[in-house]
Image (cartoon, grey):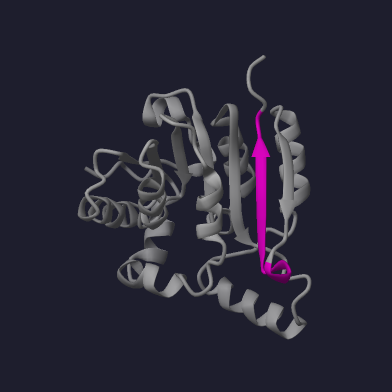
Amino acid sequence: MTAPTDVFPASERMDAIYRWQVGIYDATRKFYLIGRDPLIADLAPPVGGTVLEVGCGTGRNLIVAARRYPQARFCGFDVSPVMLAEARRAVARAGLAGRIHLAQADAARFDPLTTFACEGFDRVFCSYTLSMIPPWQEALDRALAAVLPGGSLQVVDFGGQEHLPSVFRAGLRAWLAQFHVTPRDGFAPVLADLAAARGLSAQVDRPYRGYAVRAIAARPPLA
């Protein structure tokens, strides 16, 4: 049963974006969502650890990660019922329904205890999601809050394209805007401030000449 829209106010907006794309989403996005697999390769969760994807979409990343790390448990949430339905089908086809737990939640209001009945996760990751979430700073803060001691948050998303030709940069941004995607130009200082406020250290890189932004925020282990 789908939750009422007043519980997840962003669900109708996201469903409107994805309803006619869901069947071709993974096939088309692989050409420009650069850096997803390197992020997954860097997750390295501990044995028996837990991993959360914020905005799991079709479940593609969770399936890749679960196959790579068979010793870990995975959770993912999305606000869009359309995408969650596709993710559940994909996870079932992959034979991973026992290891990947999916739920509907709003990234800007996410609480791991109410959504997944747990205090937090050893690894949390956001793959090209913050650029689609209008209250992205709130979503980033909630993701940081879900990191357990000794754990980390990893992010990959569209960067500012600082070192790419201006014509390419303008064209890319205009094209992304058609899909309600906005690169978060203020991401680095916002992450630094939010991470520091929650006791995490953060580092940011801008690979592919600034096409993408790649960040890791780590929480120290308990003494």
Between 154 and 117, which is closer to the camera in this rendering?
154
In this rendering, position of residue 206 left or right of residue 58? right
Give 219 or 78, whichever is nearer the viewer.
219
Q: Is residue 110 above or below residue 130?
A: above
Residue 210 colored in magenta in the image: yes
Q: Is residue 107 visible?
A: yes
Q: Residue at x 51, y 32 (%)?
A: 122
Can residue 79 be seen in this snapshot?
A: no
Q: Percent from the top left, x then y, of residue 3?
A: 30, 41
Q: Which sits in the foreground, 149 or 182? A: 149
Residue under the image location 39 percent in, 31 percent down? 115
Give percent across and percent down for residue 91.
Answer: 27, 51
Where residue 145 sits: x, y (%)? 59, 31
| Left or right of 212, for residue 85 | left
Residue 28 or 134: which is nearer the viewer?
A: 28
- The residues colored magenta run 208-219
Give the percent coordinates (x, y) of residue 128: 54, 58
Point out the image quarter for the N terminus.
top left
Q: Give the mark count.
A: 0
- Is the residue 148 above or below the residue 102 in the image? above
